[in-house]
Amino acid sequence: MASSNFVDYVKIYCRSGKGGPGSKHFHRDTLTAKGGPDGGDGGRGGHIILRGSKNYWTLIHLKYARHIFAGDGETGSQSRSFGKDGEDKIIDVPCGTVVYDAETGEFMCDITKADEEVVLIKGGRGGQGNWHFRTSTNQTPRYAQPGEPPIEKAVILQLKVLADVGLVGFPNAGKSTLLSVVSAAKPEIANYPFTTLVPNLGIVEYHDSKSFIMADIPGIIEGAAEGRGLGLRFLRHIERNSILLFMIPADCNDIQHEYDILLNEIQQYNPELADKQRILAITKCDMLDEELIAEMKKLVPKGIQTVFISSISGLGISELKDLIWAELNKESNKVVEITHRPMEIMYHEIEEEEIEEEEEEEEEEEDLSKYKGIGWDEL
């Protein structure tokens, strides 16, 4: 997938349909001169509905369709006939889409399953016709209820990729190479940092036609949770993963130190990520012999399952697949529940310097009071 085609964030403006007004009609026919009120109710305004779709992988289809309006309800008619409901507007989104209020940043809803539907904005209710307002003392009500106005709201859609395993590591740790070896995905691979600019998904085949999904996100650097590098933007894609696969190259200076940095960054971004099952893979081990591997096993972090692998030679790849599959089938790792925190909305603030410049310009404006009495007052 081209990097320009991966859109995981979009802001759209939605407006539901307004309710149709009730009818003020009175019954008339050839045999009835004054039949009384028979005005029907107005139709309901159209809803804005989100629907999960397995045919979409990104939000690119909404990138240039950011104004979405539902249909208005029609007016009620005679014989207590209801007005036609407004047309609902259905927005198809990929599974894993999360919706936030664009003004307050509050979480609104999320879509996790195909064909799951959520009413994002309700349409206005139709007004009641004059038939509802007849009484013994007011037998000819010449008024009806108007429909409810539409609801307008700007919302932010964020995509959080649904995958079983998420790859976490520094740039050039071998994440994309591993994904290209164990799956049919073809991520960009090169010998420089931040080769991966967008998340990549791959389906890893296992024994007996079984499979699981692996997600590769751009490399994380120290300070990613504070906005450095590309990590902050894409860290949300590992929130839904059942297992986090930490990848550290064998030629690094300190395995324990790099692992602590990665773990600290994801904890700062979302403390719930620390509760997920973690596996450590030491990559680029094709340059090591058995003696070096035995020595390095003494330096790996304690309390985490570790596998020494090489994507080039295939060392440890089968062992890694077996370990991942065993962890995925544990009951504790099957249910992935996350708490969606409110989004921070950045508002544009006018700097004090700009305000001071505007005040100076106002002071420099010419005083026109000296021209009084020269003829301008009569104009």
Image (cartoon, rainbow, N blue to C red):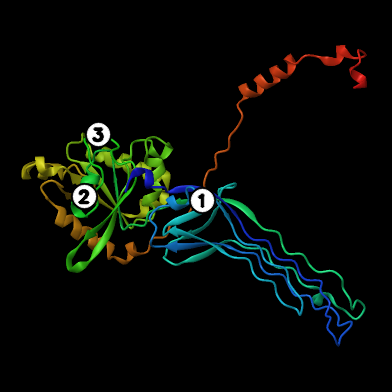
Residue toward you, 196 or 92 = 92
Is residue 339 among what the camera can see? Answer: no
Q: Which mark is residue 65?
A: 1
Residue type for callout 1: Ala
Of mark 3 and mark 2, the one earlier in the sequence is: 2
Rate crowding at label 2 as few (under 14), some (14 to 19) or many (20 or more) other CA atoms within 10 Å: some
Left or right: residue 128 compared with residue 98? right
Picture coordinates of residue 318, whole percent (x, y)? 15, 57
Nearer to us: label 2 or label 1: 1
Residue type for callout 2: Ser
Residue type for callout 3: Tyr
**Which residue in the structure is indicated by mark 2?**
180
**Which residue in the structure is indicated by mark 3?**
192
Q: Considering the numbered disc 3 on the image, is that residue within a helix, a strand or a loop? A: loop
In the rendered image, the vertical position of residue 288 relative to residue 159, given as above or below: above
Q: What's the residue at 64%, 63% (across, down)? A: 123
Q: Answer yes or no: do the residues labelled 3 and 1 have beta carbons within 8 Å?
A: no
Q: What's the residue at 91%, 12% (across, down)? A: 374
Q: Considering the numbered disc 1 on the image, is that residue within a helix, a strand or a loop? A: loop
Picture coordinates of residue 284, whole percent (x, y)? 16, 42
State how far apart marks 2 and 1 are (Cα): 34 Å
